[in-house]
Amino acid sequence: EAQVTQNPRYLITVTGKKLTVTCSQNMNHEYMSWYRQDPGLGLRQIYYSMNVEVTDKGDVPEGYKVSRKEKRNFPLILESPSPNQTSLYFCASSLVREAAYGYTFGSGTRLTVV
Amino acid sequence: AQKVTQAQTEISVVEKEDVTLDCVYETRDTTYYLFWYKQPPSGELVFLIRRNSFDEQNEISGRYSWNFQKSTSSFNFTITASQVVDSAVYFCALSYGGSNYKLTFGKGTLLTVNP
């Protein structure tokens, strides 16, 4: 089944403890992206990647890192999480030539930083 | 810069009523793409429709219909004969090539359909 898989689905952590949210897709998509969703703000792009080893900042990159060493994986790294990073996170992917057609989204990761 | 405005934060209707969700967008690009997504209480994002800027035909899919008007920069979504299962947050979104196809989302409209 074609899908984007995020793990974990739920995570509660403490301030400053490094964490990684994994994202993997099985559709051979070049384009991958991370969004965060916050009440009243909608979804905002954190980082995106057009292909392996090609990443760039979105609208709200502060406090996050990403890497794209393999085409299928695009982990989101929080080196020192803070409570303002408590949010619902979505990973998304697409073929570059079809990015205009929209993305396949993962099921989301609900992160709470205390 | 591109922007999507969903002025209706929350809408509450009774089952079988028709309801329209408004979406107004701003972009300087002549080629762009508009989307609607549904987010049910379970949290996932469900793709509903995509429209490109050159296709102003309205679309109907079952009880759902979409009205795209470039003259007013609007892409409104109507649910006919609403059902309880339609209760969700609905997001309108915009992308274009110059933004590396980043989706710019509106803030969403929470639709509650009461029995």
Image (tube, grey):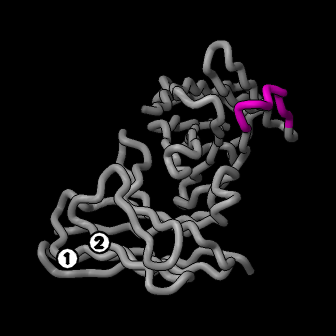
Whether the residues at callouts 2 and 1 have beta carbons within 8 Å, the answer is yes
Front-most of residues B74 and B12: B74
Q: Looking at the magenta stretch, what is its main secondary structure?
A: loop
Region in magenta: B52-60
- Locate residue A48 relative to residue B12 in the image: left or right: left
Which residue, given by chain and number where applicable, does mark 1 sit on? A79
Amino acid type of the residue that numbered disc 1 sits on in the rendered structure: Glu
Q: Position of residue B85 (x, y in %)?
A: 69, 48
Front-most of residues A87 and B50: B50
Mark 2 lies on a secondary structure that is strand
- Locate residue A85 relative to residue B72 in the image: left or right: left
**Disc count in the image?**
2
Membership of A8 in magenta stretch: no
Mark 1 lies on a secondary structure that is loop
At x 57% / y 36%, what residue is drawn? B111
Which numbered marker is on residue A65? 2
- Locate residue B29 relative to residue A58 in the image: left or right: right
Can residue B38 be seen at all in this image of the molecule? yes
